[in-house]
Image (tube, grey):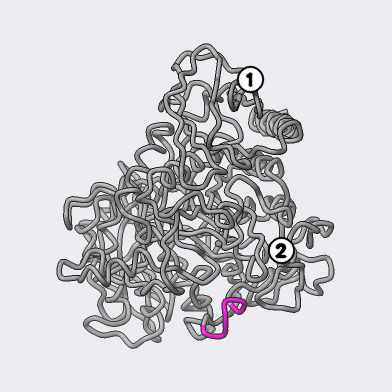
Amino acid sequence: MTSKLHKAVLRTAVALFILMLHTSLLAATADLKVEPPFWWAGMQNPNLQLLVYGTDISSSEVDIDYKGIKLERVQKVENTNYLFIDLVIDKDIKPGKFKIKLSNEGKTTHTYEYELLKRDDSSITRKGFDPSDVIYLLMPDRFANGDISNDSHPAMIEKADRSNPSGRHGGDIAGITNNLNYLQDMGITGMWINPLLENNNEAYTYHGYAITDFYKVDPRFGSNVDYVNLVSLAHSKGIKVIMDMIFNHCGINHWFIKDLPMKGWIHEFPEFTRSNFRAESLTDPYASEYDKNLMLQGWFDKNMPDLDQRNPLVSNYLIQNSIWWIEYSGIDGIRMDTQPYPYKEIMAEWAKRVFEEYPEFNIVGEAWMQRESMTSFYQKDSQFGDGYNSNIPSVTDFPMYNAITRAFTEPEGWTDGMARIYYVLAQDFLYANPNYNLIFADNHDLNRFFTSVNKDVDAFKLAMAFLLTTRGIPMIYYGTEYLMEGEEHKGHGDIRKDFPGGWLSDSVNLFTSEGRSAQQEEAFRFLQTILKWRSTSEAVTKGSLKHYIPQDGVYVYFREWKDKRVMVMLNNSKGSQAIETSRFTEGLKGARHGKNIITGNPFTFRNTILLEPRQALIIELENRK
């Protein structure tokens, strides 16, 4: 058994034991709910705050007797069903169980057995995703159905209805697990999975962004143990896992929304008030407080209450939840939904706390901004704006997305066509670390890329060649590899279609070559070829970027790391181009030979290079003259 597989099996066994233990504890103390459900000894931050929920417990006295634990404070709030217990845990405390006793007038009313587990030392040095990775974004409900028995669940309100584009279709963790080999064979090294936590609401629960339990995987996807098992198996195949998290809001049916702890747990209004979704107002030096407050405090949707992170009990609850999932599941990164929507100071504190525990981890924030300067504001160590530091290393590069979707479809001009990409990259001085920008051609909220480029396979190839060789961390949305189509204005169901072959009843299976059309197979193999090569190219994954201003629809750039160099030439014009190599002397550095990584053939440089119409040429340069 390989060491990776051994660790995967071990982690799954540990997770199963923890779940069984926690289940037995809940059975013994069913009248109390405690979150986090358990914790670990040896964390960098010695403070732990327990949310305790039970009927009329606020008048209780709290007693904890365990060597190495100090009961720092018990906070009582407006709702008598809550207590917040602040503990300080010694650095060298031994793992073990202890009892939390609640009493009234000297009589014990509740006893809850809590456990501190032994921390996995390897979790501290876990390496997060970085520019060497290519991330695959998948929506679990729409990717593959590996367990039909959980399509509906008696405790969950919404039942499966695959005929409804906005309904639950039955995809699950088992479906992802069953297709890890497909992702590995494609050349994917990371998965960003849309939220898997419980969404027990009446409708639109498939997307996962209206959480009703922050500590529980939705049973229609599987269990917590299934998720831990998925992470471990993915690691054994060289695939990192990024968990999608939400700080801004939760679901209307979350148990603490139904019985709010206090005023100020969420933003409340006399009547429903929606956010203006104008994140630009937060960096606008002339913005009114009215606009900024509506942006921050308005709800995303009637079914998504807006959490008030200014409340330290709320922010600490969310921060501890993130750390709990990292330690428990072994994930390699977090994608933070709607990064600008929560209060920025709290987001900075959250990231700081995460990196204190996991220095090599990584987080990408969804900063859906239209301009480079506004996007850069949300990246760690930004030098622009009001001095704010988000502490979040990666940001979503929507300006680059906008350029990619237009560059390969419009006529060339001074600022159009390939020049769009050039102008975005030319503003990289605004970013503290542009190599950590998450770059993409589409995602779960946008038009499908093949639709955006008018179903032009040549445009698809040019864009994928660029995406996988330029700076940044590339992300590919599920189905893009086989040219999935969809338009956002038709409803999100149109851009989140089921992956053909993920359901036993599907007549077409695109997980296999046999199921794809000739065009789909051509697109898949083109993408796979570059992905496989990219994982071996330090020039692309670590190197510097030098580019040349596009001319006549031809964009040329070099990637270089130590003595390794790659030349990329993208001809976006509809005609052949004879390109003089003398212009690229500083990039070629005398190289006369290389390898065409798309064809696998040797390549010899002449005084001119003939580019075919709409051709992408990627040459791995050789040092021999």
Residue found 69% across the figure and 51% down from its top: 181
In the drawing, what numbered circle is on residue 97? 1
Q: Image height check: is 243 above or below 474?
A: above
Element assignment for label 2? loop
Give amino acid for label 1. Lys
Residue found 73% across the figure and 57% down from its top: 220
Residues in magenta?
A: 489-494
**Which numbered disc, 2 or 1, marks the residue that appears first in the sequence?**
1
Where's residue 8, x and y in %?
A: 67, 34
Q: Quadrant of the N terminus?
A: top right
Residue found 74% across the figure and 52% down from its top: 174
Q: Nearer the viewer, residue 42 or 622?
A: 42
Q: Image height check: is 28 above or below 524?
A: above
How far is the residue under mark 2 from the one under mark 1?
47 Å
- Bin the neighbour count of mark 1 within 10 Å (Cα to Cα): few under 14, some 14-19, many 20 and up: few
State the residue position of label 2: 511
Q: Image height check: is 7 above or below 403?
A: above
